[in-house]
Image: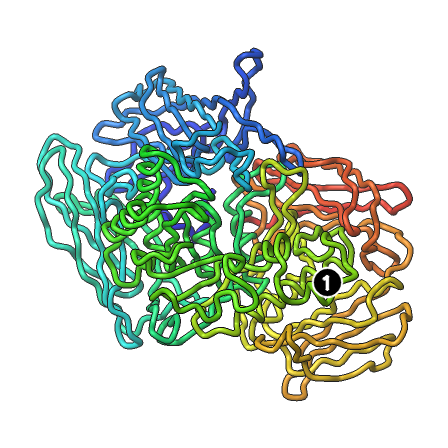
Amino acid sequence: MKLPYLTFVLFFVSTLFISSCSNPTGSASSNQRIVLDFNEQWKFLKDTANHQAWQEIQLPHSMKIEPLVVNDMWQGTAWYKKSFKLGPQKGKKAFLYFEGVMHEANIYLNGVKIANHKGGFLPFSIDLTNQLAEGKDNEILVKVNNEDNPMIPPGKAINTLDFSYYGGIYRDVQLLLKNDVYITDAVHANKANSGGVLIHFTEISPEIAKGIVKIHVKNESDKPKRVQFKASIGSSSINSNKVTIYANSDTTLEQTIEIAKPKLWSPQAPELYNATINLLVDGEINDHVETRTGIRKIELAEDGFRLNGEKIFIRGTNRHQEYPYVGYAISDSAQYRDAVKIKNAGFDLVRLSHYPQDEAFLAACDELGIIVMNCISGWQFIGNEEFVKNSHQEIRDLARRDRNHPSVFFWEISLNESGMDDAYMTRANEILDEELPYKDIFSVAWIDHPSYDLFIPARQHGKAPDYWNFYKEGKRKVFIAEYGDWEYYAQNAGFNQTAFADLSEAERTSRQLRGDGETRLLQQAMNFQEATNSNRKGEGTIGHANWVMFDYNRGYADDLEASGISDIFRIPKFAYHFYQSQRPSSETYSHPGITAGPMVKIASYWTKNSPKKIRVYSNTEEVALSLNGKLIAKQKSTLDKYSSHLGYPYFVFEIPAFDAGELKAEGFVSGKKVCEDLVKSPKTAKAIQLEIDLSGVSLAPNSADVAFIYAKVVDENGTIIPTAQHTIKFNISSNEAQLIGENPFTAEAGIASILLRTSSFTKEITITAEAEGLVKSSLTIPIQGGK
């Protein structure tokens, strides 16, 4: 299912669907393309040697449900097949569009090999037309291989890669039916600065935005055709010139467009414009495409980075796209939920480390106001000529897929932490310039090379105590692409490590699981705070992105990489709330699931073992802390060497002695209370509290979806027991859903998590959870419709 905000929102014809939308039949209407969901009723075979039976599956799909900690990821060859029928399609074209297959695919139609594709992170289209059997059963067969391949980026063997890329047809597939004169797909057309629909605004001011709309058209009929496009963006409409396109040829149509008093896109106001394009052939509508775009002015200026004329410092994070157990095979709705969590954490940028991520995630960033640093796939590896050729093609495909997204500000056409030579880097930038020859297309790299526009080192690549704050060797601005992890894990960060001499090496690191305890989670939060504060001391840095948003698998390790400010199940740690506090309280958002404005959070469980020095995160002017109704203090934020350059320093309160009960923090702006937070000392575990994490996006009604279920061990007041390690058994009553993961699951810091996977959502779902000594809990998810 593609959510309404996604890039190509095209017309659907319901009469073409039979057998639960999987077997289109009949003829396409004469004036529009048809886009069919092709995710259902596939069959899957992982191991032909053992003569296994074909399994009925639904896309997106991972070749193996992996354990929570993946240190021996399944690699090999697997097969997918699907039967479908098309009625007579005279004068029509049929294409299959794969959003992502990991990482080499051979495609067969009716027993004939019709395509090979290398690369697991970007889409590809296949023309089925000549091999289709009209009015009869057709079989599409996909041979998928995800074994180590040094020719295919990222190229590095999985046992040393430091992230997992899983396998299978893990993103959506669509069947497209078009007339034989049509608007092409940008990637499939394989033409520089062309293909599909290209929209770019080159002159932007508060009064007017001027830009271009380019359409690439192909004529696969046997006659010349007179073609023209008509486009509207918002209230502005344009008509291109009419041109003749000869049989079996193609052409690019281009027209300028102007929009008066444009609504400009920004993280605080992510204004989007609907763009509608009609292709006219001999005066009649022959193809139709709808997309969304935005208008923003971005500049790498002498004094820093400017967005719509305003200088800003960019607060960012890094994201790996994996979920536990299913890897990359997650729904569009789940992609959106991750974007919501990133926005709720207070970030305005996400770096897509270290590979191109799902189209749905980019579209969510467009809608929610999250700047994107878009990346090609690579990490500490560069291969031979064939690898370089494939990597450079990936740059082209990335540019073509994502060029219309207003959220994409930066293009990381660099193999991260890899020894690229001058030839690779120079050619990479030449390719991006060929694809997007515009002044506001900014290339970025971890090496300060003159071909690139922005230098993005990791913090640990510099030296304490200044790191990159006063870097003047190059002519490029600096964005710190990673910080907060490695310098505390493998180096002496040069700061608070010496202040905590009583901590072991494991306690000092930022790699702390949510179950590692209050002291270690506070240390992680302090590491991130200290590094954030340090990064703000210099004048040459335009922004930074912490490492990392969510815990993730490294593919070869016996544990999770745990420097996430949320765990792999997306449950926040204390550090998450530090970042929340760095967003101004004046910022508010109307999007479902987004929480913003004034906030205050007590970073304590308030047990007898909790530190008596209480840390409170808030973006307000003053905070009052009370214990059991008695005021401890009302004070302004604490300025010290760990907070001197923060927009919103933390608050530190001293409590003489532990007294079980309720801590209450109240935030004040201009003397008025605007927010509060409560922490209660946990009592004896009594019950389970079940919750589903939807983050403002209901379960998809007509397609597959995944969402997290949390079973919280609570006391009589509903307070989570942070030390609870009960073994919790989950059950489900639904023929449309299943639970994926360890079951039973031992609670971590009082919460047991499991993944709910649905095939559709037309009936309510009931989930129960039970554990010895606790009151059993039940959660019913009612039908609410999809976003």
Image spot of residue 780 (x, y percent): 71, 46
Residue at the disc numbered 1: 522
Dot 1: element: helix
Which sits in the foreground, 530 or 337? 530
Q: Is residue 48 left or right of residue 452?
A: right
Task: Identify the residue at image location x=38%, y=24%.
Answer: 106
Residue 15: in sight, yes or no?
A: no
Where, by quadrant of the figure, is residue 618 drawn? bottom right
Q: In the drawing, does residue 133 fall left or right of residue 174?
A: left
Q: Position of residue 278 (x, y in %)?
A: 24, 50
Task: Give the vertical position of 370 relative to 180 (above or below).
Answer: below
Image coordinates of residue 590 in percent, x first then y, are: 53, 67
Question: What is the tally of numbered marks visible in this picture?
Answer: 1
Q: In the rendered view, tell whether residue 66 sits above or below residue 544.
A: above
- Considering every residue shown, the one lying at the far bottom of the view is 671
* Image-quadrant location for residue 46: top right
Front residue of 509 and 614: 509
Name the residue rendered at 75%, 35% in the picture: 743
Instruction: Name the residue type under label 1.
Output: Leu
Image x and y of residue 444, in percent: 38, 56
